[in-house]
Amino acid sequence: MAAHETSDGMPLGIDFGGSGIKGAAVDLTKGDFAGDRVKIKTPRKSTPDAVADVVAELIEKIMKQHPDATGPVGVTVPGVVQHGIVRSAANIDKSWIDVDADEVFTQASGRDVHVMNDADAAGLAEARYGAARDHKRGLVILTTLGTGIGSAFIHDGVLVPNSELGHLEIDGHVAEKRAASSIREEEDLSWEEWGDRLTVYYRTVEKLFTPDLLVVGGGVSRDAEHFLHLIDIRTPIVAAQLQNRAGIIGAALVAQESADS
Ligand code: BGC
């Protein structure tokens, strides 16, 4: 049996995003998908019950490919998640607030589901298998630049959840409303203009927390060569390596580790 597998089978990771809900069976020994990724469109009104139905359907689809994926299921949510309960909903349906998401997904799927913040999952995956895997000591901060800005704090390899650095207020603005990737698209900013905004953002993060390494994730990290060099800060800053696989891999990892503990 591989180091991370238990007799309960391989874990699943599911990533709940604004446009799609995606999942896969995850091989934690390799830190990668064990098979194909399955995707279903996010329901237009993404209420807890509607999303729970999609999660249950995704699990069934993945199980057809991987009947051995009977382990715990990790699900990411783009909001604060405190012990399974969703506490914020900046970019999702407001009806999520104060919902026990662990319970809703476990009921809908009949599986042991563990819910966590999306950036926390991605950050842990990058720390374990990706861009920060050689930084075992000190503070690594991963930020995801997408519809909003997500963040993960990892100190000496341990995640401190729900850091929410996208909601730092800088010069009277909520940071993600100025510097998220969606804002670059909406305001049609050039890479240079966006780079200036990112410099303001990351200088604030650096001033407040003095990280040893910053990792930039989110879909736009694929375009890192266009903007990473424009961010003028002291801290080393690198692109994420697992890109859109990080959330799913991290979700499965957290679910497995909480089931084992
Ligand atoms: C939410 C975070 C989330 C991030 C990325 C922010 O608006 O508050 O919880 O991680 O978006 O989805």
Image: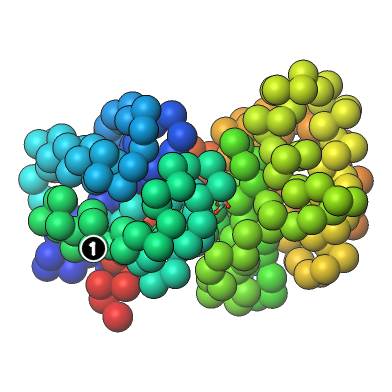
At x 67%, y 64%, the residue is: 140
Horizontal side of residue 256 vs 95, given as left or right = left
Left or right of residue 30: residue 181? right
Q: Outermost residue, bottom direction?
A: 261
* Residue 174 appearing in the image: yes
- Of 116 and 87, nearer the camera is 87
At horizontal 86% and vertical 51% (from top left) the residue drawn is: 172
Q: Is mark 1 within 8 Å of ligand 1?
A: no
> Where in the figure is residue 40, as x and y percent of width and height?
29, 29
Q: Position of residue 208 (x, y in %)?
A: 82, 68
Which residue has dot 1 on it? 103
In the picture, the quarter occupied by the C terminus is: bottom left
Tell which residue pokes out farthest to the top in this image: 188
- Residue located 82% across and 32% down the image: 194
The image quadrant where one finds the N terminus is: bottom left
**Residue 29, visible in the rendered structure:** no
Task: Name which residue lies at 77% across and 22% down.
Answer: 187
Indicate the amino acid at tag 1: Glu
x then y, percent, for residue 4: 28, 66
Residue 219 at x, y percent in the picture: 57, 33
Q: Quadrant of residue 21?
A: top left
Q: Is residue 196 above or below residue 186?
A: below
Relative height, residue 8 to residue 155 (above, below): above
SS type, badge 1: helix
> Coloring scheme of the render?
rainbow
Q: Nearer the viewer, residue 135 or 125?
A: 125
Q: Nearer the viewer, residue 166 or 223?
A: 166
In the rendered image, the residue lying farthest to the front is: 95
Mark 1, Cα crowd under 10 Å, few <14 / some 14-19 / many 20+, is some
